[in-house]
Amino acid sequence: MDLNVRIKTWFKRLKDFQLKGWFQEKMTENIELGEDANCIYQILKKENNISSKRILDYAVTQEFEAICTGCVSGDAFLRAIKKLEKHGYVKSSLGKGGYRWQLLITE
């Protein structure tokens, strides 16, 4: 492997590690990314690595109905989950039955 590639790879890993640490320091019980994102975050704290359908099923339960007022619609869900993914809180994987969402950062 070329030395420049190795150095760039090392710096990328260091940056990823530092960002993850920074996000963990900034995380609070209710994240500051909006109500819909908080809804999804709280659901993924309860059951991690689940499908989009499962998240939407949880959103209409009695346990989450108070905080999941907007993300029961597909558009709001998509905007919120993409915001969480953009900020590094969750990652997606395409699997059998659609996308699955995994929470990367907790408190």
Image (spheres, rainbow, N blue to C red):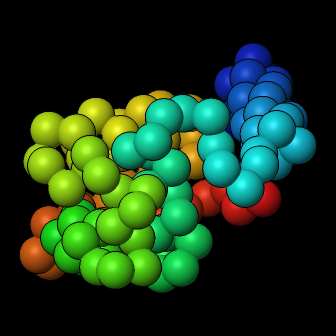
User: Where 1 sits versus 74, above or below?
Assistant: above
Q: Position of residue 38 (x, y in %)?
A: 51, 49
User: Where 59 sits versus 16, above or below?
Assistant: below
In this rendering, does residue 28 appear at all? yes
Instruction: Check the picture and name the quadrant holding the C terminus.
Output: bottom right
Please tell me which residue is depicted at 43% across the width and 57% down the height of the picture.
67
Q: Position of residue 66 (x, y in %)?
A: 40, 62
Q: Nearer the viewer, residue 45 or 94?
A: 45
Q: Nearer the viewer, residue 36 or 45?
A: 36
Asked if residue 105 lies left or right of residue 14, the reply is: left
Q: For residue 99, what is the image quadrant?
A: bottom left
Please tell me which residue is depicted at 54% across the width and 33% down the height of the picture.
33
Asked if residue 13 lies left or right of residue 47, the reply is: right
Q: Nearer the viewer, residue 60 or 93?
A: 60
Number of labelled discs? 0
Asked if residue 22 lies left or right of residue 1, the reply is: right
Asked if residue 74 lies left or right of residue 105, the reply is: left
Q: Position of residue 58 (x, y in %)?
A: 30, 76
Residue extending farthest to the top is: 4
Q: For residue 9, what is the image quadrant?
A: top right
Q: Position of residue 24 (x, y in %)?
A: 81, 48
In this rendering, does residue 85 appear at all? no
Q: Nearer the viewer, residue 68 or 46?
A: 68
Instruction: Check the picture and name the quadrant holding the N terminus.
Output: top right
Please tell me which residue is depicted at 82% across the width and 38% down the height of the picture.
26
User: Where 66 sits versus 15, above or below?
Assistant: below
